[in-house]
Amino acid sequence: MERTLVIVKPDGFARGLTGEVLRRIEAKGYTLDTLQIMTADRDRLAQHYAEHEGKPFYQPLVDFMASGPATFAIVSGHRVIEGFRAIAGATDPTAAAPGSIRGDLGRDWGLAVQQNIVHGSDSPESAEREIGIWFAQR
């Protein structure tokens, strides 16, 4: 089985959307293996977003992700990385297709890169790296 990291970001958590996001994951047939709620610390955020360091959106993204509680989940299933990214929708909530998490629930505050409700790993390698950052010994 493939695994991915899913994060319900601080905007989604603050709006009470964690349950809806998790419902959609389970409705798709994926398994929620591990869940935790926490406010992300800057050291782990720096590891998580290391490939973006130096880009103009890096610091605002780290600041946003450290701004409040978020839900972190290890999700498993057949082709779960591709499948979750499909149900999450395009990064820009305005461009995201209706029926997707971002298309149905996202708001465009001009901050689409940061405040777009969810994160999902983009490859098996990224998933394992990200899971290792947020879930020790998993």
Image (cartoon, rainbow, N blue to C red):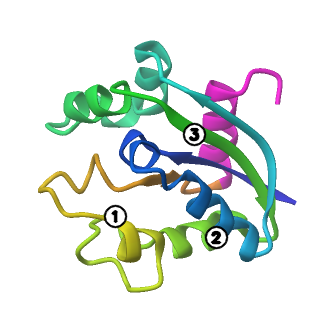
x 20%, y 32%: residue: 60
Residue 68 lies, with reference to residue 8, above or below; the image says: above
Judged from the image, the secondary structure of the residue bearing numbered disc 1 is loop
Q: Earlier in the sequence, mark 2 or mark 3?
A: 2
Tag on residue 24? 2
Amino acid tagged 1? Thr
Q: Secondary structure at mark 2?
A: helix
- How packed is label 1: few (under 14 Cα within 10 Å), some, or many (20 or more)? many
Q: Nearer the viewer, mark 3 or mark 1?
A: 3
* Residue 72 is at least partly visible in this image: yes
Q: Is residue 69 left or right of residue 36?
A: left
Q: How far across and down, in percent of the image, does residue 21 sit? A: 57, 61
**In the depicted view, which residue is nearer to us: 85 or 99?**
99
Residue linked to disc 1: 91
- Direction from residue 61 to residue 134 in the image, left or right: right
Front disc: 2 or 1: 2
* Rendering coords of residue 74 (x, y %): 73, 45
Q: Give whichever of discs 2 and 1 has the lower sequence position.
A: 2
**Is residue 134 highlighted in magenta?**
yes
Q: Which residue is mark 3?
A: 71
Q: CA distance from mark 2 to mark 1?
A: 17 Å
Q: Picture quarter containing residue 71?
A: top right
Label 2: few (<14), some or many (≥20) within 10 Å?
some
Between marks 3 and 1, how big is the CA–CA gap? Answer: 18 Å
The quadrant of the image that shows the C terminus is: top right
Quarter of the image holding residue 136? top right
Instruction: Tell me which residue sits at (43%, 73%) in the image.
Output: 89
Kindly report the secondary structure that dominates the magenta region of the rendered protein: helix
* Image: magenta residue range: 124-138
Q: Residue at x 36, y 45 (%)?
A: 11
Amino acid at the residue labelled 2: Arg
From the top left corner, tell me how far across and down residue 31 is, in percent. Answer: 82, 59
